[in-house]
Image: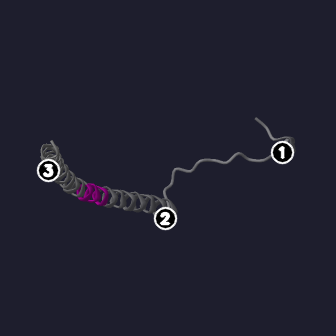
C-alpha cells in the first residue's frame, strides 16, 4: 500500500518503541480512574433504580388494596339497590 505523493521519496517507516514513559503511565492511570468512576456511577444508578421500583411496588400494592375496597363497596351498594328494588316491587303489587 503506497501513497502516490510519497513515491520516489525516501520516507522512513515509523518504528515501534517498547519503552514505557510517563505519558503511557498517565494514560493507563486515567483509563483506570475513568473505568472505576463509570462502574461506581453504574452501581449508584442500579441502586437508585431498585429503590424506585420498590417504591412503585408499594404504591401498586396500596392501590390494589384500595381497588379491592372499592369493589367491596360497589358490591354492597349493588346488594342494597337490589333490596330496595325488591321492596319497591313488593309495595307496588
Residue span colored magenta? 47-56
Which residue is pictured at 23% across the width and 58% down the height? 59
Q: Secondary structure at mark 3?
A: helix
Quickly name the residue at label 2: 22
Quickly name the residue at label 1: 6
Q: Earlier in the sequence, mark 3 or mark 1?
A: 1
Q: Which x, y percent locates residue 30?
A: 45, 63
Task: State how the image is colored.
Answer: one colour
Between marks 3 and 1, how big is the CA–CA gap? 99 Å
Query: Magenta stretch mostly in which secondary structure?
Result: helix
Q: Which x, y percent locates residue 46?
A: 31, 55
Question: Would you say 39 lies left or right of 92 here?
Answer: right
Quickly name the residue at label 3: 80
Question: Which circle marks residue 28 in the picture?
Answer: none
Q: Would you identify the image quadrant in which residue 45 lies? A: bottom left
Q: Secondary structure at mark 2?
A: helix
Q: Which x, y percent locates residue 33?
A: 40, 62
Question: Would you say 89 lies left or right of 26 here?
Answer: left
Which residue is pictured at 18% across the width and 49% down the height? 81
| Image quadrant in which the C terminus is located | top left
| Image quadrant in which the N terminus is located | top right
Q: Would you identify the image quadrant in which residue 66 lies? A: bottom left
Q: How many circles with numbers are drawn on the protein?
A: 3
Amino acid at each position: 500500500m503506497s501513497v502516490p505523493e510519497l513515491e520516489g521519496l525516501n520516507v522512513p517507516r515509523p518504528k515501534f518503541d517498547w519503552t514505557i514513559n510517563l505519558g503511557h503511565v498517565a494514560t493507563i492511570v486515567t483509563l483506570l480512574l475513568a473505568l472505576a468512576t463509570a462502574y461506581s456511577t453504574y452501581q449508584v444508578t442500579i441502586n437508585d433504580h431498585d429503590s424506585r421500583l420498590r417504591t412503585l411496588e408499594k404504591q401498586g400494592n396500596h392501590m390494589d388494596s384500595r381497588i379491592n375496597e372499592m369493589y367491596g363497596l360497589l358490591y354492597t351498594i349493588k346488594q342494597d339497590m337490589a333490596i330496595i328494588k325488591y321492596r319497591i316491587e313488593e309495595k307496588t303489587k
